[in-house]
Image (cartoon, grey):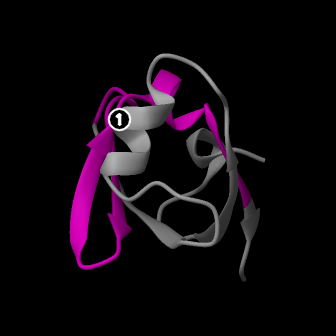
Amino acid sequence: MTLGSLRPGQRARITAVAENALSTQLGEMGILAGQDVELVHVAPFGDPLAFRILDYELCLRRAEACLVFVEPLE
């Protein structure tokens, strides 16, 4: 399962981030294995997605969110 497949309000724990050009930047934004994340909002046309991670909200495009693997918490 990936961040891009979460439903609004669903919480998950990050298990892995695909290795590519964005993986370092995602890590700098707090997208790291073991972090809990919640999908809080989906834009009207489905892109971007807003996630709550650590103490802030982070918006990612759906393509970027699909690079982050998670396991659901609920």
In the figure, residue 56 lies in which quadrant? bottom left
Foreground pick, 32 / 74: 32
Task: From this view, report whether residue 4 is shown above or below residue 29.
Answer: above
Q: Residue extending furthest left?
A: 56
Residue 51 in the magenta stretch? The answer is yes
Q: Is residue 6 left or right of residue 57?
A: right
Q: Residue at x 71, y 80 (%)?
A: 73
- The answer to whether residue 42 shows anywhere in this view is no
Task: From this view, report whether residue 13 is shown above or below residue 31.
Answer: below
Residue 7 in the magenta stretch? The answer is no
Q: Which residue is mark 1?
A: 25
Q: Is residue 53 left or right of residue 43?
A: right
- The answer to whether residue 31 shows anywhere in this view is yes
| Residue 64 horizontal/vertical position (percent) | 47, 28
Foreground pick, 37 / 22: 22
| Residue 31 horizontal/vertical position (percent) | 46, 54
In the figure, residue 30 lies in which quadrant? bottom left
| Residue 53 horizontal/vertical position (percent) | 37, 69
Q: Which residues are magenta?
A: 44-70
Dot 1 crowding, Cα within 10 Å, few <14, some 14–19, many 20+: few
Q: Residue extending furthest top?
A: 21
Task: From this view, report whether residue 68 is shown above or below residue 72.
Answer: above
Q: Is residue 6 left or right of residue 71?
A: left
| Residue 9 horizontal/vertical position (percent) | 48, 71
Q: Residue at x 63, y 72 (%)?
A: 34
Q: Residue at x 57, y 19 (%)?
A: 20
What is the three-letter code of the residue carrying label 1?
Gln
